[in-house]
Structure formats: structure tokens, C-alpha cells
Image: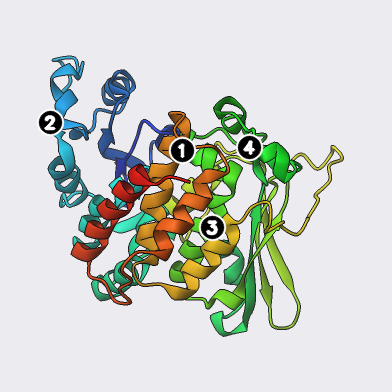
Amino acid sequence: MTSDLKNIAILGSTGSIGCSTLDVVRASSERFRVVGITGHSNLELLAQQAVEFEPAVVVVSDDSQLSNFPLPVNVQTSVLAGQDGIIELATRDDVDVVVSAIVGSAGLQGTWAAIEAGKTIALANKETLVMAGPLVMQLASDRGISILPVDSEHSAIFQAMRGGRPSEVARVILTASGGPFRNHTLGQLEDVTVEEALSHPTWEMGPKITVDSATMMNKALEIIEARWLFGLSIDKIDVVIHPQSIVHSMVEFCDGSLLAQMSPPDMKLPIQYALSYPHRWAGPAAKLDLSEAFQCDFVPPDYERFPALLLGREVAERGGTCGAVLNAANESAVAGFLHGRLKFTQIVTACRDVLNHHEYDPNPDLERVIQIDRWAREEILRWKP
């Protein structure tokens, strides 16, 4: 073990980000030690990871499934359960970096606890900032800790911003693949099936995030995340459709210079950069092959076909409880679509309706954020077109 070895905890190790994080660890095992991992439903994979990495702690986040966890008895690992287990792991004294990769609002409390404990955060859980951006960034500032983006778009912005001073940034431009329906008409979108929505052209992700990409709600949430993560006003955040997913985002400076971060669509690169920051080293991420011809297309987004983008801009500008409501309503609406209760085009419509009639609070505390999250989910269950 070297003196600069980093001890990491991975919240959500069985998801796509968590598995990619472990790929990064495998490639740089002399630099990282996995102190703890968490999983929710894929207990077999969680057990396999425990055997391979021998963490001090494994957390089964669904405590009702704890008795089903098949950890071999010869592995010297403490097994914890539920939200309390996640928080115990995230706040351990021997953890340096917490990779926040639990999907959805479920990731907020563990991330919050890690920030309170003074841990560096490698943030893949965008919902943390969508729900409680001002609170989270203020807490991080108070604790003197860094929140390092793992989302490929925000990592790209973070990297490109190093090319100038914050005061020199004219705008940031989030790229979006456009999902599987970027060329669909409004009429075609009415008939989208679950199977079609789960077929993403460039990324392999979980079902919730894949549907978000199809509605472009993922980009709406990323607009909100960028607003708080980088302290930008909404007029400095734009979106462009880039189907190839090679340019992951761009920063335009006041003199007109545009800096872009480019790489194949491989999450191992932004994960490793967050873990290695402020350094870089060789890793397992795929690299661009410039000996082969390729093209990069950029197309303005169509706000009529993808109204989630306007919704994201509105929520980012208004702040307060709007982010928590939008995030919770969307999670519940996506679940409704996946289970056949809502049509694809009703996801964003339902979210807007719930947002429009919620009791707005411009300065909520964390308790209020969690309370209104529950309210918005229940409203979606009651929603009818």
C-alpha cells in the first residue's frame, strides 16, 4: 500500500456506474482500496464484488432482502442494511472518497451524510443537486470538501473550465445524444413502447436513466445540476444535440474560444478523472481512434418534441422546491410508464402538472425537500390526463 492510496466507498456498486468504477479500480489497484460497497436488488453481483474486493463493509440497501444476501462465510466483511447502513459506510473514518452512484432520490441522504463527514464526493447521482442543490453546495463549502462530477457532461465542463477563469466563462453547452427518438415526429412519440424507449443508441444504462434519455428529461436534470454545481445563471447554460456522443460538453469563454472534451462514450474516463483529480494517469477507458474517419454532428434541440428541456430550464431558474418536485414526479412517472400506466408522452405532461400545483417554497431545508419528494410521488400516482 502506497502513502497516496485512496480509500473509496461506492454507493450503488452493482449499477452501471458502480461496475465501471470497479473496472477503474481493477486497472489501478495500487492506487485504490475499496472500503465498502452497496447494492439494492442484484445481491448475487454484490456478493461477487465482495469476494473479489474484500471490502470492510457491504450494505444491502433494501433491508428486507438482507436474509437473502449470499455472502460466503469465509469473506471477512461486515454486512449492514438499509439507509442507516449506507450512512454508516459513507461516514467511516477510513473512507477518503465516496462515489455517489445510487440512482434517483435514494442517493441524497447517503451523499449528504458523506459531505457532513468531510468526504470528497465523486458525484454520479445528479438527483442530489437537482433536489437540494443550494443546500448541498453550501454544506460542501462549509465542510471545505470537493464535489467532483462523474456525469460525462459535467465532467467535460469541469475539465474544460480549467482552460480559463470562472469570470471568463460565457456559457456552458451540454451535449445530448438525443436518445432513440431524436428523429421521431410528435405523432410517432405518442406510440412509443417500453421496449423502444429502453433501446439507447450509444449508452448502456439502467432502465430509469435510459427512459430519461429518451424523453430528454436527463438533460433537463443536467441543466439543473449544472446550475448549482458550477454556480451559473440559467442564461449561461445551453444544450445541443450531438448523436455520436463523442463531444461530452463544451465551455465557451468570453473571447469566443470554445473548449470541448472528447472521448468515446465510456464512463470509465470521467469516473477515473474524479477519483484521480487533480492528476491524470493511464486507465482502462476507450480512446478515440483518429486513424479512422468519423464525424461530429451538432443540431439545436426541438423544444416542442422534447418539452422536458424547457421544464428543466424553468426549474433551474426558479430553484426552491421545484427541483425536488420535478425529480420525484419524473421518477414516479417513469415507473408508471415502465409498468404500463402512463404513455411515453404523458411522462413530462404529468411532471409539469404536479410542478404547477405544488406549494412552492423558495428556501426549503432538507426535511422539507424530503417531504415534498414524497408528496410529488403520490401526486403522480393520482394523476390522470
Residue 114 image position (x, y, % from top left): 23, 56
Mark positioned earlier in the residue sequence (1 or 4): 1
Whether pointer 1 and pointer 3 mark residues with C-beta atoms closer than 8 Å, the reply is: no
Q: Is residue 328 rendered to the left or right of residue 165?
A: left
Q: How crowded is mark 4: few (under 14 residues within 10 Å), some or many (20 or more)?
A: few
Numbered circle sitting on residue 220: 3
Q: What element carries label 2?
A: strand
Numbered circle sitting on residue 120: none
Whether pointer 2 and pointer 1 mark residues with C-beta atoms closer than 8 Å, the reply is: no
Which residue is denoted by mark 2 in the rendering?
78
Q: Is residue 83 rendered to the left or right of residue 248?
A: left
Which residue is denoted by mark 4 in the rendering?
286
Residue 11 image position (x, y, % from top left): 30, 42
The answer for how far apart the CA atoms under marks 2 and 4 are is 35 Å
Residue 338 image position (x, y, % from top left): 46, 31
Numbered circle sitting on residue 208: 1
In which quadrant is the N terminus drawn? top left
Q: Which residue is drawn at 34% across and 35% down?
A: 13
Please name whichever residue, 270 or 192, is drawn nearer the observer in this view of the structure. Answer: 192
Q: What element carries label 4?
A: loop
- Which amino acid type is marked by label 2? Ser
